[in-house]
Image (spheres, rainbow, N blue to C red):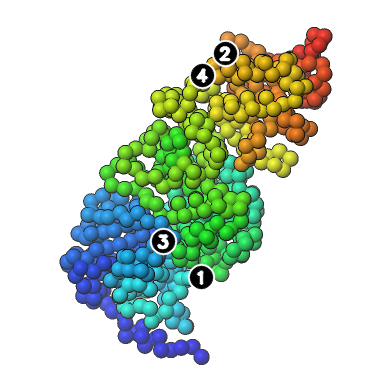
Amino acid sequence: MKNIRWRKQYVSRTVTAADISLIIKPGSLVFIQSGAAEPGFLINAAIGDSSIPGISLLQGWSFSDSDSSLSFNSGFFFRGSNGKKSLNQASYNYIPAHLSELPSYFQSKIIDLDVALIQVSPPDGHGLMSLGVGVDITRAAVQSAKTVIAQVNQFMPRTHGDSFICVEDVDYFINQSEELMELPVLHPGKEIEEALGSEIFELIPSGATINVGYGQVPAGIVRKCYGLKDIGVHSTLVTNWLMELMLEGAITNNCKNINRGKAVASMAAGTRQFYDFLDDNPNIEMRCSDYVNSPEVISSHRNFFSIHGGVKMDLTGQLTCERNEPGYYGGVGGITDTARNAIRSTGGGSVVVMLSVNSSGESSIVPLTGDGVGIELKRQDIDWVITEFGIINMRGRSIRQRAFDLISIAHPDHRAELLNAALSKKYVDFSPGRTHLSHMNMRTTEINGRSMTIKTCSSADLPTIESFYYKMSESSKNFRFFSGESSISKHIKNLEETDDIHTVTLYPVGGRQLIAVGELSASSREEIGDFAIAVGENYRKMGYGKLILEKIRDLSLEFGLKTIRAEVLTGNYAMIRLLRSYPLKWNETDMGSSLIFTANIQ
């Protein structure tokens, strides 16, 4: 038999809009539920006429551009772009904090809440109501505030997980249904989404668990990952991408070692269709921030990948999510919780995805992030950085290597300026030529079921290439240089100083072991390019030499060359087989101790 006691409590605690401002006392600290769960009608009823003196407002993050907070001292843990108007005009306080720690701030009275204004679904037959799309820090606020006032809204989805509270947990109810605020589906552009999405697709293995940060770039590229299988979700925020990939079958949560079969989040925002999808969906759980962002929970996941956007990254690898303008934009939020602990996850990693330039055409990769701008992720907190110009792995990389790598995925229009800044700050010790700068590129690809990173014109790789050459066997050195060790140092010096020799390097994704190196000597004054290829002795007969040759051909076409040429010692049977099997019409000239292969590529 269902408990009917709650019905009497519900009726007796129901008030009108006119009553709300009388309930809140002067000087109160008032918590407001965040994001799409923001109780708009209740806020206007409580503080819309600004008649309560001395109160302070506290909120996690806001979509609203409402001016209702202008007369109050308002505190925020995160600033989103939608709320900039009111915040820039108000007297507000930005409170830096990790999402994983915020519930304890309320519970321990570090932040002592007087009132919590929340929004819930109508009570079910047992008197249970759902916090819907905003469980995050709200559940702790409900448990900690002296007075809880709830707007009961039939449009609030009834979500599962930690979202349920009892009628007994609420002191006053106001019945008002209104559509939730929607977060529109924004796209950075089809070509950019596909370029970024292809890199994510190669990087994240099937069966991985993902966290996707706030913003159109991370959400936009995840939508392009339809080919992934059995992806799991454990994310601070979920938007329409969750629905799209679950309906597509890419997200199943079947391989998660924690909360198997369930997508887990603490906040949700999207379209009306997305809210309908969340409603009473047993495959999705909304949990508290101290669980979703818990370092222990995140790092205990296998293959956990944190995918975040950012505003700017400096040449050493520090990321900010704040704009260099008066006030704050962004906030620490959940990014440090998820990114740092993704690195601790077995098989996981921290990924930053950015457009190379912002809407004003300014470079997102900069020499320095700016005075007074907060750093969300430090140099050691990021594994991968992706722009539409490629992908780099920063784990274990020196400042010199990071600077060159980041310049290689910056927009070509800004690379020369960034290089000059890197030289002046002594991040790098030499300047690659203008041709190298314009053709720097990094991409991922798959060969024989293995994801590989292929780079062109990467100045950061010169020390690795030098080590690779020195470690080759004497016969391999002879085949590559037609001599022994004595010419390697001179050759590397030549690579640093000339603008006419362009490198192609191949690595396993996430690995440091150089697998193969190609070099193309191409001058703008000539129509023929000379090339050479060296494949690590443990990686031969696997198709890697062919992949390097294909990239050399592509690079030659970019330079406008008509012909490519290679001289091969007659004893280098592996290279001879590679060239003869490659689909180009080669002309072979016998020089006695060597063969010269020449082919038209136009």
State which quadrant residue 201 falls in. Answer: top right
Closest to the camera, between mark 3 and mark 1, is 3
Image location (x, y in percent) of residue 494: 59, 16
**Do the CB atoms of the residues marked 3 and 2 lie less than 8 Å apart?**
no
Location of residue 155 with respect to 318 vertically, above or below = below
Residue found 20% across the figure and 68% down from its top: 27
Q: Secondary structure at mark 3?
A: loop
Q: CA distance from mark 3 to mark 2?
A: 58 Å
Q: CA distance from mark 4 to mark 2?
A: 13 Å
Residue found 30% across the figure and 75% down from its top: 147
Name the residue type under label 2.
Ser
**Disc sitting over residue 492 in the figure:** none
Residue at mark 2? 524
**Disc sitting over residue 101 in the figure:** 3
Residue at mark 1? 160
Q: Earlier in the sequence, mark 3 or mark 1?
A: 3
Residue at mark 4? 433
Image location (x, y in percent) of residue 11: 34, 84
Name the residue type under label 1.
His
